[in-house]
Image (cartoon, rainbow, N blue to C red):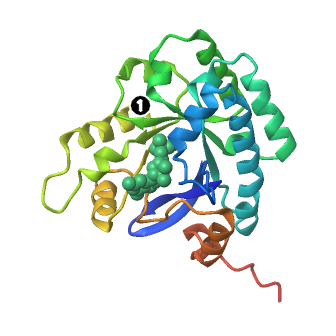
Amino acid sequence: MHYQPIVSLDGGKATTVGVEALVRWTSETQPDATPEEIVRVAEENDLISSLDKFVMSRACRDVHKLQEIIPDRPLILNVNVSGIELVDKDYVSHVDDVLRATNWPANQLVLEVTESVLDVDTPCAIANLRELSARGIRIAIDDFGTGYSSLSRLKTLPTDYLKLDGSFVSAISTEAEPPPLLEVIALLSTALGLPVIAEGVETLHQANVLESMGFSLVQGYYFGKPTDIDNLVAELANEPPSPQLAVRRPEPSTS
Ligand code: G
Ligand code: MN
């Protein structure tokens, strides 16, 4: 498993506020499989449920190690969920099992679901999302902006974050004006009260433009490539403390 930091921007200061778990497959004899290939093969062989369960429990255990370094700053853990899983009537109880076994708090878990999964009218998926949401688990719409999402449904579905697809971010360059749709998405995010996590941020310029447009949560190679948990633990241990910690007043003197 690899983990990529999710970072909050605040006037030039970047603070890690969470991680996305990304499945990786490395082999000594064959080229590494991409996450898409892994998911496709698992879906074709009826193993997606086992894969998703493995990924979630492994991620919950691993990210505990990160959380221990910064006990005062609760991290969110984002896990990708397959559409096939979401329509399983036992899915919610699988998630319950994992949270119980790993002790990871429900309100620090974010499930990433792609837009296309929610496009189709699947009462079971919606019912599952509502049940998960009632437990304090949050839902992010992955690859936002690339599907045909019905904007009115965003208000009725239990949605907590939009993950802005990296194609919008890669269109931000020093040579051209930022894509006009970014302004629209920024307004939509404010109007619906749905924070955006911008994906695929690779340059400081992109980060500055996004922050100036009101996007404060970002993810991408500029802030951190997906890496194993031990590397991330080492990096986070070196990150300066968050502003709240830095300005914490000394205990009043009793003498
Ligand atoms: O579908 P989803 O957005 O969850 O996919 C995330 C994928 O994007 C991961 O495979 C990850 O390695 C890749 N990724 C993460 N950050 C960057 C980035 O800054 N640039 C590019 N090109 N890919 C990225
Ligand atoms: Mn994702």
Q: What residue type is labelled 1?
A: Leu
| Image coordinates for residue 96, horizontal then vertical, percent | 80, 32
Q: State the image coordinates of residue 44 (x, y, percent, origin top left).
A: 60, 26
Q: What secondary structure is marked by label 1?
A: helix
Q: Can residue 164 be seen in this snapshot?
A: yes
Residue under label 1, please give it.
Answer: 192
Q: Is residue 158 left or right of residue 72?
A: left
Q: Of all residues shown, which one is farthest toward the front?
A: 29
Identify the residue at image location x=71%, y=29%: 49
Structural crowding at the residue carrying mark 1, measured as other residues with C-alpha within 10 Å and reported as few (<14), some (14–19) or many (≥20): few
Name above or below for residue 44 compared with residue 25. above
Q: Quadrant of residue 237?
A: bottom right
Question: Is residue 219 something one can see in this rendering?
Answer: no
Task: Relative to 156, say whether 218 is above or below.
Answer: below
Q: Quadrant of residue 132?
A: top right
Task: Determine whether 141 is above or below 73 in the image.
Answer: above
Quadrant, the C terminus: bottom right
Q: Residue 88, image x and y in percent? A: 69, 18
Compared across the picture, whether 61 is left or right of 209 comes to: right
Q: Which residue is drawn at 70% across and 37% down?
A: 51
Total number of numbered discs in the rendering? 1
Tell me if the residue at label 1 has its CB under 8 Å from ligand 2.
no
Q: In the rendered image of this protein, does residue 245 appear above or below residue 44?
A: below
Horizontally, residue 118 falls left or right of residue 130, namely left
The residue at 58%/40% (across/down) is 38
Q: Pick out the residue farthest to the right.
A: 101
Q: Which residue is drawn at 73% across and 39% down?
A: 106
Q: Where is residue 150 in the image (x, y as percent from the top left)?
A: 37, 19
Front one among 204 and 120: 120
